[in-house]
Amino acid sequence: MTTVAFVRIATRATARQNLFIRNRVVSATGRSLSSTASSSTSDHQTTIAQQQQASHQARKFSMAKLTDWVKPGDNSGEFKRQASSLRNWISREEGAQFPPEKGRYHIYASYACPWACRTLIARKLKGLEDIISYSIVHWHLAEGGWRFVTKEEEGTDEAPGENVIRDPVPGHENFNRLREIYFETDKNYDGRFTVPVLYDKKTMTIVSNESSEILRMLGSEFDDLIDEKYRKIDFYPSNLRSQIEDAHSWIYDLINNGVYKSGFATKAEAYERNVTALFEALDRAEKHLSTTEGPYWFGDVLTEVDIRLFVTIIRFDPVYVQHFKCNIRDIRSGYPALHKWMRNLYWNHPEFKDTTQFEHIKWHYTRSHTQINPFSITPVGPLPHILPLDEEVPVAKK
């Protein structure tokens, strides 16, 4: 496809989304609460307890702005990620509070979010499609947090991708935002309403909102329920565990979170310090992949490291280079080994490709982070979002 054709497609998508943002973006106190109010006349639809909960939610969320990524009053200008606070565990051990069961658990995720996409990749790789259900929130993150699509948006160009649907869990028919699930679990919850969420449909509670731990649960705790070919897939093999943990220790802080520490910084000193550390870590990753036989981080074994690093690198050129000012180099022209590694996972493993939705990714970052991009204009490029395996940008051919 020619560059002109790519631009035309992207321009049409941008026009549709500009219209969408003007007409359909739901405010924190708009459709969510008005929907609850309009149905309150029917006792069987909305209980008094639900109304009180909705009011409680609105009061709590109004205390902080969505775009306060750096805490107001923090003169360091540093983005400090909030630790996940809901961290129970699905376990095969006898007497476990959350045992593995077919059909019991649900994952709430966002195609835009790299942390959430870790769990979507693992779910597919381990053959858990018929055991754990999932749904995708709308790509736009506004005051009020992640929301579910409206019935009118389902299946349209405004909400592309598989399973971008209303909350499908029985009992949640009137839920419009992810935060309602958090308050269902803990009415006093005062953290951010993040994805992914691993939810127990039997006890109507969140099991965990920590992506690294959900990834590990999916990697092992359902093995008794899946076919042998999937049981053989081990993201965390015993002989590599120390090396995996060592890789996690610097990849998480300097790359996965490093792009956010660069992009959300509110002081030049904080930005420059973190973006420099980010590219030093990318250089380190490039050196490692240049010396391994591949195609994975640990040679011929696909592990957690591949999953956790991929979700950041696949977003790097389309979003982080321009939106987060991570522009010392891009992946496609500056890191040949990383570029090859990423494309192998994307093009040769449907589990990675099918959970990568570039429209959600680009629209979310550029239209939700209004403190960075106040006019919500989404860049057309880079085109294509990912190059074929056998194609390189001209500078990389030299």
Image (cartoon, rainbow, N blue to C red):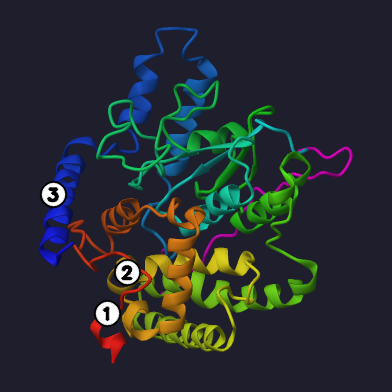
Q: Which residue is mark 2?
A: 387
Quadrant in which the N terminus appears: bottom left
Measured along the vertical axis of the image, is residue 52 above or below residue 360? above
Measured Cα–Cα span from mark 1 to mark 2: 8 Å
How dense is the environment of label 2, judged by Cα within 10 Å: few (below 14), some, or many (20 and up)? some
Tell which of 153 and 291 is nearer to you.
Answer: 291
The amino acid type, in three-letter code, at marker 3 is Arg
Tell which of 324 and 57 is nearer to you.
Answer: 324
Mark 1 and mark 2 residues within 8 Å of each other at the beta carbon: yes
Instruction: Please report whichever mark, 3 or 1, sits nearer to the chain's N-terminal start.
Output: 3
Disc 2 is placed on an element classified as: loop
x, y percentage for residue 273? 43, 85
Residue 203 in magenta stretch: no
The amino acid type, in three-letter code, at marker 2 is Leu
Q: Which mark is residue 314?
A: none
x, y percentage for residue 341? 48, 74
Disc 1 is placed on an element classified as: loop
Q: Which mark is residue 393?
A: 1
Q: Which residue is mark 3?
A: 12
**In the rendered view, does 190 fall on the left or right side of 247?**
left
Q: Residue furthest bottom?
A: 398
Instruction: Please report whichever mark, 3 or 2, sits nearer to the chain's N-terminal start.
Output: 3
